[in-house]
Amino acid sequence: MVAGRDCIALMPTGAGKSLTFQVPARLLDGTVLVVSPLISLMKDQVDALTQLGFQAAAINSSLELGERERRLDALAAGQYELVYLAPEGLDGWLSREARNWPLSLLVVDEAHCISQWGHDFRPSYRRLQKLREELPNVPVLALTATATRKVARDIIYQLGMKQPEGFKGSLYRSNLKIYCRKKGTGHTRSEIAGLIRARQGQSGILYCSTRKAVDQTTRFLCDQGVKALPYHAGMEESDRAANQDAFARDDVDVIVATIAFGMGIDKSNVRFVIHRDMPKDVESWYQEMGRAGRDGVDSDCFLFYSWADVKLQERFGNDTEDPELYRAKVEATKFLFRLVENGGCRHQKILDHFSEEISACASSCDWCTGVTGEDLAVEGMALRSTGDPQKPKPRGRIGESRPLSQVDEVLFQDLRKLRKSLADQQGVPAYIVFNDTTLRDMAEKRPATPGEFLKVSGVGPAKLERYGEAFLELTTLRV
């Protein structure tokens, strides 16, 4: 890629995909152009890059015309190292104008969106074909975490990639603990509430298949004392944005959403993802539950499923005009049901779908450990009956990540409060300051000097300069 070759990379969420274009942005002359569907996240991504010392900007429909023109002029003048652009913005004029930009690399993030055989096809991504024609000598980097071989081949074809280098990182994420629970054998809504109560104060996403289910489930959880907000396409855009912002800033614990929430979240400390209903295919399931544990800390993923979910997904696909595509989508949903229903190591089955072979995980799914989602739900429901939501969580079941000592846990929670205060002052999500992994390491190491602070995982010179004084004031008090 740095040598000018096209490249396609399949990497799991949280594996550092952004580094594959941030490093070239520093090494290559010119601007790295990142085409991404994540309009709602572009500001946060640019804020994070700016804190790392990059000259970066986002250009999308959220900008007023004057500001958009100013940024396009700056792009043409070579003033940026990195620019994020939404595919919707690639109208005919802008694609033609791109030939005058000093680009060193074209990055297509979430590249599976360009393939109709992918699980998240977006027609706007077809505009990239015109952009590619205008940039014949600019190397292309296509990034995705959820592409089968068929989809990967289609990405290469659609983007006109020339003998691309291929890289495939392991999609296995051992920190994701997967539990599957068939509906109809218990009270699903109460079990979900129990699971969430057992994780009080932790961030989580609850996916539902319909807007009505989102609204009803949100009301139910709020009645149970859970700090939850809804998110779906039937809401006013301003309300959706406000709810997503509240979740990103840790003002609420749970966001209840349809897949309209999609790729609109880049929050590293999501500790659990619950699917109230079965997703449409393996790729969607892997991507959606993959929003948990991006910081590498153990996180729980619960799937509630039934054959009724399969029939519902069939009805959702009735407006698909291409009969072959419709049949393929229906079969993909049935395949997911059989994959879950037939048992076996959950991680092993998922990765086999992506042509990756691993041994049974032994410790990261219900099938291998014998600990079921029902067991954990019962534990959570017991908290409600005892009226003790602060009951200690059983080790080995709920949250196994390198347990902190009681003293370190107190400091960790104080560091979280400081992080949120600083993030709120800057108007950015908390994870942009530091993620949970960094705060946990900080709580254990208790740095007392700038040099010791730099030895904390996730701390560099820019973060030391920006936040060192505030956090050292807190950690030195506990040494």
Image (tube, rainbow, N blue to C red):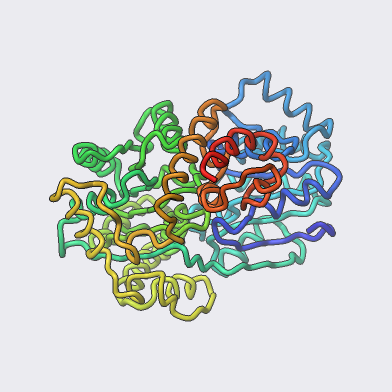
Q: Position of residue 285 (x, y in %)?
A: 41, 59
Q: Position of residue 446 (x, y in %)?
A: 56, 48
Q: Up-down: is 218 above or below 379?
A: above
Q: Up-down: is 19 above or below 227?
A: below
User: Closest to the observer: 26 or 113?
Assistant: 26
Q: Position of residue 403 (x, y in %)?
A: 42, 59
Quadrant assignment, res 45 = top right
Q: Position of residue 466 (x, y in %)?
A: 66, 34
Q: Up-down: is 43 above or below 452?
A: above
Q: Is residue 125 left or right of residue 401?
A: right
The answer to whether one can see residue 402 in this image is yes
Q: Residue at x 67, y 36 (%)?
A: 51
- Farthest residue to the top: give it: 66
Q: Is residue 106 left or right of residue 390?
A: right
- Farthest residue to the left: give it: 385
Q: Residue at x 23, y 49 (%)?
A: 193
Q: How many marks?
A: 0
- Farthest residue to the bottom: give it: 359
Quadrant assignment, res 32 = top right
The answer to whether one can see residue 113 in this image is no
Q: Residue at x 23, y 58 (%)?
A: 377
Q: Up-down: is 95 above or below 378?
A: above
User: Closest to the observer: 321 or 384?
Assistant: 384
Q: Is residue 373 left or right of residue 154?
A: left
Which quadrant is the N terminus positioned in?
bottom right
User: Closest to the observer: 270 or 471?
Assistant: 471
